[in-house]
């Protein structure tokens, strides 16, 4: 049987039906490599399992555990697979993405094992007692560190927050035979990916995001947000006020009661910067704000700010970007 490193960090990787690991996989393995030896778990229907394992090794997993499950969205089965991997590896910590599926797997797994669950971490470090997680809380007003007093921490990591990447490894794969008790109490009879008629990057994983707020004024005028997003190759987000006004669907809401994003670039157009909005975006690497009110709180966290009318400033920004592309 494969021996696992004493400082193993077990990393649960999500898979897609298209045969690719979720985009955040390299980040998670990068985070794990900073505090120990990354061991990846890929659990999916058999079809692409070999490809997933190869991708995990390429992204830095020193060892890969693979488990056949009926569906990559049945979190009960995924938690079963994680349990088996955990028992085998005895890791110092378990890392998962702070995504819908992984959050559920993390919660099920942590409860079953009475392990501490640290959610929405922006990074992981090691101190003399073990692996600890760092967080930004209360709308970014405080930075905190969480550490369990016993056992391995189960940590969900915010997508986009880790820049480190692990070195590619030769695939060393161990197949897990899932023990009994894994019979699903739900069956997936049909699975269809929601049709997206947009070629824009998905908000949660986009490296650039342009968001619009109430300052856009109307659904028609919100089109300016899409125009700038397309000029930058960015995903589109919004404040709750813009969502409540019906300018865009709720899935685009960034903030405390929406999506938390951590892109390389976040552009806020006509957004005041309420604490609940900041909670979902202030860990972005570079924040640009355009607002006609020079006292708007968004400027307190912006790296670059333009005090001006979005309808005057943004068309000029788009022209400048297009002129640069044409060069
Ligand atoms: C429990 C709770 C949860 C919440 N969750 C969220 C959340 O998840 N996400 C979220 O965003 N909010 C959330 N909110 C709401 C939040 O408090 C704010 O009301 C909201 O973020 C305001 O959105 P806004 O900045 O678009 O609108 P406003 O605060 O009205 O700001 C509009 C801004 O546009 C500027 N502006 C107007 N016209 C122009 C122009 N032509 N050019 C340039 N600038 C212009 C104005 O100067 C102003 O600063 C929550 C609130 C509560 C109580």
Image: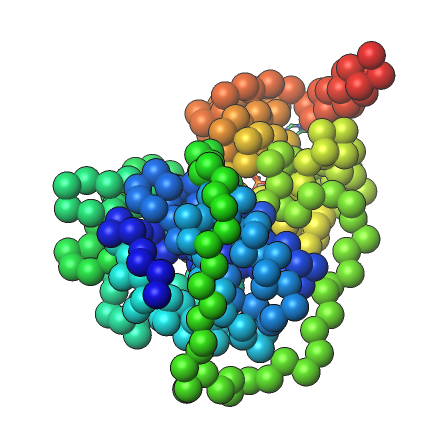
- Identify the residue at image location x=19%, y=40%: 127
Q: Nearer the viewer, residue 249 or 36?
A: 36
Instruction: Say how the picture is coloured.
Output: rainbow
- Identify the residue at image location x=50%, y=21%: 303
- Residue 274 at least partly seen: no
Name the spot of residue 257 as percent of width and height, x first: 49, 54
Q: Quadrant of residue 212?
A: top right
Q: Quadrant of residue 283?
A: top left
Which residue appears farthest toward the right when viewing the image? Answer: 326
- Does 182 sit left or right of 238 as displayed? left
Q: Nearer the viewer, residue 55 or 313?
A: 55
Q: Nearer the viewer, residue 269 or 236?
A: 236
In the rendered image, which quarter contains the N terminus?
Answer: bottom left
Name the spot of residue 233 as percent of width and height, x first: 72, 33
Q: Is residue 113 above or below residue 93?
A: below
Name the spot of residue 327 as percent of width and height, x first: 82, 12
Q: How many marks?
A: 0
- Identify the residue at image location x=49%, y=29%: 285
Which residue appears farthest toward the front when viewing the image? Answer: 1
- Identify the residue at image location x=55%, y=85%: 186
- Does 272 sit left or right of 174 as displayed? right
Quick check: which quadrant has ligand 1? top right
Name the spot of residue 13 as percent of width and height, x first: 49, 57
- Residue 106 at least partly seen: yes
Q: Nearer the viewer, residue 280 or 298?
A: 280
């Amino acid at each position: 049987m494969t021996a696992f490193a004493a400082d193993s960090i077990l990393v649960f990787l999500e898979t897609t039906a298209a045969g690719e690991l979720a985009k955040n996989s390299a980040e998670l393995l990068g985070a794990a490599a900073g505090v120990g030896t990354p061991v990846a778990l890929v659990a999916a229907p058999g079809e692409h399992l070999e490809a997933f394992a190869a991708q995990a090794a390429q992204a830095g997993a020193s060892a890969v555990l693979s488990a056949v499950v009926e569906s990559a969205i049945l979190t009960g089965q995924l938690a079963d697979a994680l349990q088996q991997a955990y028992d085998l590896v005895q890791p110092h910590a378990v890392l998962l993405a702070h995504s819908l599926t992984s959050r559920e797997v993390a919660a099920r797994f942590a409860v079953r094992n009475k392990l501490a669950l640290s959610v929405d971490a922006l990074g992981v470090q090691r101190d003399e007692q073990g692996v600890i997680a760092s967080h930004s809380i209360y709308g970014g007003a405080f930075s905190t560190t969480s550490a369990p007093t016993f056992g391995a921490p189960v940590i969900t990591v915010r997508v986009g927050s880790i820049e480190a990447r692990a070195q590619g490894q030769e695939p060393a794969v161990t197949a897990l035979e899932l023990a009994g008790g894994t019979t699903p109490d739900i069956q997936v009879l049909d699975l269809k990916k929601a049709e997206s008629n947009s070629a824009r990057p998905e908000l949660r994983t986009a490296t650039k995001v342009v968001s619009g707020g109430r300052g856009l004024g109307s659904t028609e005028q919100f089109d300016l947000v899409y125009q700038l997003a397309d000029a930058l190759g960015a995903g589109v987000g919004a404040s709750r006020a813009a969502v409540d006004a019906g300018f865009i669907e709720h899935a685009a809401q960034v903030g405390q009661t929406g999506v938390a994003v951590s892109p390389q670039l976040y552009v806020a157009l006509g957004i005041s910067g309420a604490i609940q909005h900041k909670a979902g975006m202030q860990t972005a690497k570079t924040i640009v704000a355009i607002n006609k009110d020079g006292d708007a709180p968004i400027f307190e966290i912006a790296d670059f700010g333009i005090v001006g009318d979005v309808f005057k400033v943004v068309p000029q920004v788009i022209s400048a970007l297009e002129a640069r592309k044409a060069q």
